[in-house]
Image (cartoon, helix red, strand yellow):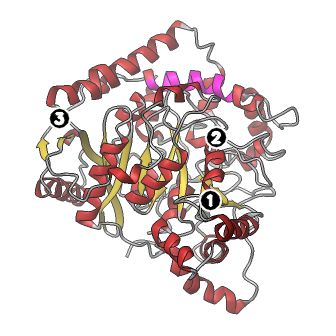
Amino acid sequence: MNRRELLQVAAMSGAGALTGACGAGVPPASSEESRRDARTTSGEVAEATIAQLQAAMESGKATAASITRKYLDRIASIDHAGPSLRAVIEINPDADAIARSLDEERKTKGPRGAMHGVPVLVKDNLDTHDKMQTTAGSLALVGPPPTRDSHVVERLRRAGVVLLGKANLSEWANIRSNRSTSGWSARGGLTKNPYALDRNPSGSSSGSAVAVSAGLCAVAIGTETNGSILSPSTVCGVVGLKPTVGLVSRAGIVPISHTQDTAGPIARTVRDAAVLLGAIAGEDPRDPVTSQSAGKSHLDYTKFLDEDGLKGARIGVLRGRFPRHAKAKAVVDAAVQVLKDRGAILIDPVDLPAVEKIGDAEILVLLCELKVDLNAYLATRGPDAPVKTLADVIAFNDKHAEREMPYFGQELFLEAEKKGPLTDKAYVDALEKCRRLSRDEGIDAVMDQHQLDAIFAPSGGPAGATDLVYGDRDFGGSSSPAAIAGYPNLTVPAGNVHGLPLGICFFGRAYSEPILLKLAYAFEQATGARIVPRFLPTLE
C-alpha cells in the first residue's frame, strides 16, 4: 500500500538476498551475441496488446512458446542485466513447458478465451503452489511453497495464461515501517523506475507496474490496500485498476486488511485491464465477502468500452486533490479540458469533506486487522512454514536485521503486534467511522448530491528520487477515499512532466467498474498519453 498519505497520519497518533533473489531463475542468454540481440527481438512484444498477441498466435505467426521466450529474453536483458530494473523477483521454471502445452491445446481444442497463451506476472504476495516462492519480498517466508494456489492464480491458470513469474514489491506491501522506501524488498532488492532509473517506482505493486511498463510481460497482477496499484501505475505510465473489495478473491494473498485489500489488473491499455479483470473477478467460497459480488461481476468487461463514453457522463472534479507543482497541475488541467471536449458534464469542483475527518482511524483499522489476518494466513502455509505468526516475523527480522532492516525498521509491525482482538471497542469504532465517512457521508453522498457517474482526480506523481536514507516523500495522490470505502478506482496515463508520467483517475460507487472502464477508455482513446520508457539513468 502507498503509505504516503496514510502513514503521515500514523506518525501523529542492502541488502543481500538468499536463494530466489531478484532475477532468480532468469535464463541467461546463451551467448554474447544473443544478449546483444535480445532487446531487439524481444521488442516485438514490448508494447503488444493482448489482442495483438492473440492475433499473432491465431495466424500462426507466433506461438505462446515463442512469445514467452521473447518476454524471458527481455527480462534477461533489461531486468536482470542492462538497466537492471529488478521488477521480476523470480521466473517460473515451468513457463516454457506451460506455453508449449497451451500451444498444443490451441491446435487440438482451440483457445480457452482471450487470455490463452498470454504471459502474465503476479505480485510476489499471491500464493502459487508450484516451484516458485511466495514471500511478500521477505526472507522470512522463503521455504516450503504454499499448499495451494491463490484463487486469483487458480482463475488465471483456468483462463490459460502462461504464469511467467513473480514481480518484486515493497516488502510486506509497505506495511512494515512508516519510513520505508517503496520498491525495496530484502529478497528482491530495489526496483527502479523505467523512465529514470534513479526515480522511485512507488509501491507496493512496484514490480508489477514496472514490468508492464517496460514490456517484461503482457499484463500483471498487483494488490492494493491504499494506493498500491494506483500509485505505481501512475508513476510508471500504465493503467491500474483497484477493484471493489469483494469483486476479486483475496484467498491465498498475503494480507494487510480484509477491509481494504484487493488484487487487480495492471496493463498498458484500458482494454487489456478489462480483459484481465474479467479473468480474475468472481465469487470464491474461500473469501466470503465475494458473495456480495453475485450478479455484479462480469466475464467480459470489454463490452463496456466505448470511445464516446465520456459524452453525457456526469463527472465530479475533485479539485482539492490537484497538485501544487505547476507543470503537473497543467497536465491535470489539460485532462479536465479533454473531458469537456469529449462531452462530459463536469461538476467542478466537488469535495469530500467527510473523508478528511477520518484521521487516524484508518491506520488503527489496518494495524488491528494486520495482526489477525496475517496470523490466519500464515496458518495456511502448513506446519513446515518458517514463521507462523506476526511475532515470529518480528523475531526473524530482529535476528536477520543486516539483511532485512538495513535501511528502515519494523515500527508498524511492532504497533500491530500490540493490538488486541477485533472485538475491541477502539477497533469497532474506528471501522464504523471509516465506513461511514468514506461511504455514506463521503463518496456516496457527493455522488447522490450531484447525480455523478464518477469522480475525477489526479492519481499522483511525478515520481520522486529514490532515497534509501530518508524513505518515501509525499507527492500527492487520490487513492485514499476509494481505498477506505472499498470502492473501485482506475488510473490511466494523462501526460508527463520532464519525461516522468502522470496519471488521472476515475473512482465511484461499489461495483462501478463498467462505468470507470468506459470513461477511462474514452479518455485514453482521446489522448494516447502513454509514453514508452527509455531507461534513462537520470532525467535529461
| Sequence-wise first label, 3 or 1 | 1
Label 1 crowding class (10 Å Cα cut-off): few <14, some 14-19, many 20+? many
Q: Amino acid at mark 2?
A: His
| Sequence-wise first label, 2 or 1 | 2
Q: Which callout, 3 or 2, points to the residue nearer the camera?
A: 2
The residue at 35%/33% (across/down) is 481
Residue 490 placed where, x, y %?
A: 37, 47
Residue 107 placed where, x, y %?
A: 66, 71
Does dot 3 land on a helix, a strand or a loop?
loop
Q: Amino acid at mark 3?
A: Val
Q: Which residue is mark 1?
A: 161
In the picture, measured across the screen, residue 107 lies left or right of residue 429, that is right
Residues shaded magenta: 362-375
Check residue 484 in the rendering and tell me which mark sits there, or answer none: none
Q: Which residue is mark 2?
A: 151
Out of 470 and 522, give the one closest to the viewer. Answer: 522
In the picture, measured across the screen, residue 360 lies left or right of residue 458, that is right
**Residue at far right of view:** 384
Mark-to-mark CA distance, 3 and 2: 38 Å
The answer to whether residue 83 is magenta is no
Mark-to-mark CA distance, 2 and 1: 14 Å
